[in-house]
Amino acid sequence: MNRAVTTRRRFVLSAVTTAVTSALAAAVLLPAAASAAPANYPSRPIRLIVPFAAGGSTDLSARLVAEYAGRELGQSIVVENKGGAGGSLGMGEVARSAPDGYTIGMATVSTHGSNPAVYPKLSYDPIKDFVPVTNVVAIPSVFAVHPSVPAKTMKEFIALAKANPGKYSFASPGAGSLGHVNIENFMMLSGIDLLHVPYKGAGLALNDAVAGQVNAITDNLSSTLPHVKGGRLRALAVLGAGRSSQLPDVPTYAELGFKDMGEGGWFGIVAPAGTPAPVVAKLNAAIHKAMQNPDFKRKVEESGGTLVPTTPEQFKAQIEQAMARYARVAKTAKIELN
């Protein structure tokens, strides 16, 4: 009887030991398998969600990434435009996608900077719901006035606006848009008071600025440049890291003493939170290699942009800086959208 019990105990102990040993072996093998899996990545096409309509600067940058980085990865990168709610709908879809590297998104200073400040019920968290891959393109914006405004420099415009509070108007693509928030920031920093005229889109705002229906506008360099060169608008300041080679005589906000305006717009790649680090590293390397292509660089420069490759950590820091800046502006200017 005792011998039988002892035998059973030994059998049970042996089985438990075997199970534990197998579990430990599996635990050791799992990380190795996970790190080895990206060696086959990507094995199918990648979706690149653009949170704005086709044809704009964000879309152009995304299609360059898709074309040239796709070659480096040996797979198609398919651009999908998912516009709406200032870019929030498309970025929300990216955030909810599987973190496997097969869905990525084109983040902008709007989706990851100003939107979190003005939309208290945003469907995503710019930090928690994404992993930054790399910044790609910096696009400066231009503050311009209609030629009928009697100011040839920003200093003259500020003096004019201070002498006539609320008289001069500015157009924006809509309440809470990046164009709106940027000029609110400028008004706070310069101490002037302009009348905000919101439109349903950047195109309509720019058309009325060119027609003189409103006095001023801030818009992407690529959109504004033809009108500045044609004499239909007068550029007074550039929001960017440095002067634009296409408007070398126009100073930056920083040069004018307004460093807290930031460094302008940017378009970068993010992936859903939880995307494996090796996948992020592979995407980062492929995009950086693509950005070295002379045609990629030429097309970006023709659109008024500059290439800004970063590490994921550097891009995260840029996102956090933009969020902090626009949170301050939205709170002070009391900008909040449902």
Image (cartoon, helix red, strand yellow):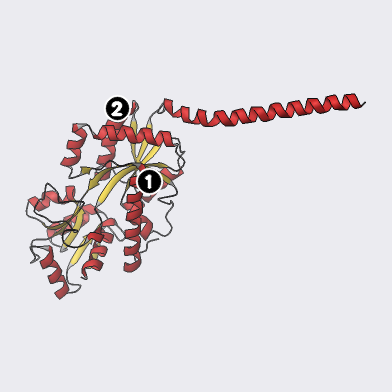
Q: Residue 119 at what x, y percent from top left?
A: 39, 58
* Viewer-proximal residue among 283 and 85: 283
User: To which residue does mark 2 refer?
Assistant: 71
Q: Residue 257 at what x, y percent from top left?
A: 18, 63
Q: Residue 146 at what x, y percent from top left?
A: 11, 61
Q: Residue at x 8, y 53 (%)?
A: 249
Q: Quadrant of residue 261?
A: bottom left
Residue 90 is marked as 1
Q: Residue 232 at what x, y percent from top left?
A: 9, 55
Q: Looking at the image, tell me whether mark 1 or mark 2 is earlier in sequence order.
A: 2
Q: Could one spot residue 86 in this view of the protein?
A: no
Measured Cα–Cα span from mark 1 to mark 2: 25 Å
Q: Residue at x 39, y 36 (%)?
A: 280
Q: Which kind of residue does numbered mark 2 sit on?
A: Arg
Q: Is residue 223 left or right of residue 278?
A: left
Crowd class of label 1 (few under 14; some 14 to 19; many from 20; radius 10 Å): many
* Viewer-proximal residue among 335 and 197: 335
Report helix, strand or loop for mark 2. helix
Image quadrant where one finds the N terminus: top right
Q: Quadrant of residue 47?
A: top left
